[in-house]
Amino acid sequence: MFKKTIYLLSLLIIAFPANAKQIKQEKAIPRIDQLSPPYLSTILLLSPCLDISLLGFPNSDNDDDTIRMVDEERAKYPANTCNNSALANKLFKARFLQYSTITLVNDPWNLDIEIVKQNKLISQCKDTACLDKVLDAIISQLYPLYVNPPLPPSPTSEELCRSIDDLSNDKKMDLVIKKLVARLSTDDNCGSKDFSNFGDNPIDEDNSKPHTNVLFYLCKSNIGDLFTAQCKTFGNQVDAETWIYLLKPNMKPKLLFNAYSGPDYNLDSTCNGMPDFVTSARYSNAERQIVYYRYNGEQYDAAYSYNALYISRDDNGNDMAVADLIKKKEIICK
């Protein structure tokens, strides 16, 4: 698969050194006054009791929409929750652990199941004593995972492809491949401009295919021969449109995956015999969209996605992110 450099996810996941067990490092949770989320909805998700005017949002006395959003979010909790500063801080701590830990694990769809259960317990509380007890349980459950998350995926993780394939001796398949490359090199896809002379293009170092605008590979996988292609990039371009096709004799190439941000890392987990993978697309310096794909038996489908929002920076200068705008789809793995 495509080998993108580690920095694509380095701001989203914390990689521990090999001797991490020998280094005692207490990982901090930010204070409420350190928050700087870009969206009001994110602030209310993490800390509904916070005086949002302190963060530069419109004064709620003069903004009907803001009043409505704040009232609706606070109504989800027992009366007097925001009158108890200790409880309000505990609510923030629990919420932060829930949505920051999602950005640290490699299988967020599994953690999400636990968070849904936790939030159901919160919604069932009718008084602050119940809420206090539930929040303590959430913090106890998630803090160890937040402090010591699993190792992030790396380029050495299990690949989609088992081995490189050579179909050049198969005239029918060779023709299919040439047609695919020609179609992807058109203006509607990777463009017709010739990028072969861009010497400073790191992804274009292989000049074995200088007359195409796609880099493509052929390999064997658990489900058959795969054709993977990515538009050539140049300059400081990072993301490029990516395709994965399944090739079978006497059959039209079957599209398994297509997205502007190609697979960044394959994961150790699998579904229906094929590895899961994750993509990362930058929206801004403070926001990325992370999408986890799983093979549903027919094609790769987006199983879990979220926007990773950078909300704070700890005392050591490390960016802290939380998952917001979560979307999920159950993929049945057999």
Image (cartoon, grey):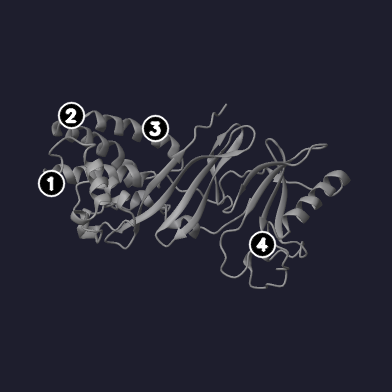
Q: Position of residue 36 (x, y in %)?
A: 29, 58
Residue type at mark 4 is Lys
Upstream in the sequence, badge 3 or badge 4? Answer: 3
Cα gap from disc 2 to disc 3, whole angstroms = 23 Å
Q: Mark yes or no: residue 132 visible.
A: yes
What numbered label is drawn on residue 205?
none
Upstream in the sequence, badge 2 or badge 3? Answer: 3
Q: Residue 270 vs residue 29: left or right?
A: right
Instruction: Label 2, secondary structure: give it.
Output: loop
Residue type at mark 3 is Ile
Instruction: Label 1, secondary structure: give it.
Output: helix
The residue tagged 1 is: 85
Residue 11 quadrant:
bottom left
The residue tagged 4 is: 232
Q: Residue 213 vs residue 234: left or right?
A: right
Within 10 Å of disc 3 (Cα), the crowding (few <14, some 14-19, many 20+) is few
The residue tagged 3 is: 113
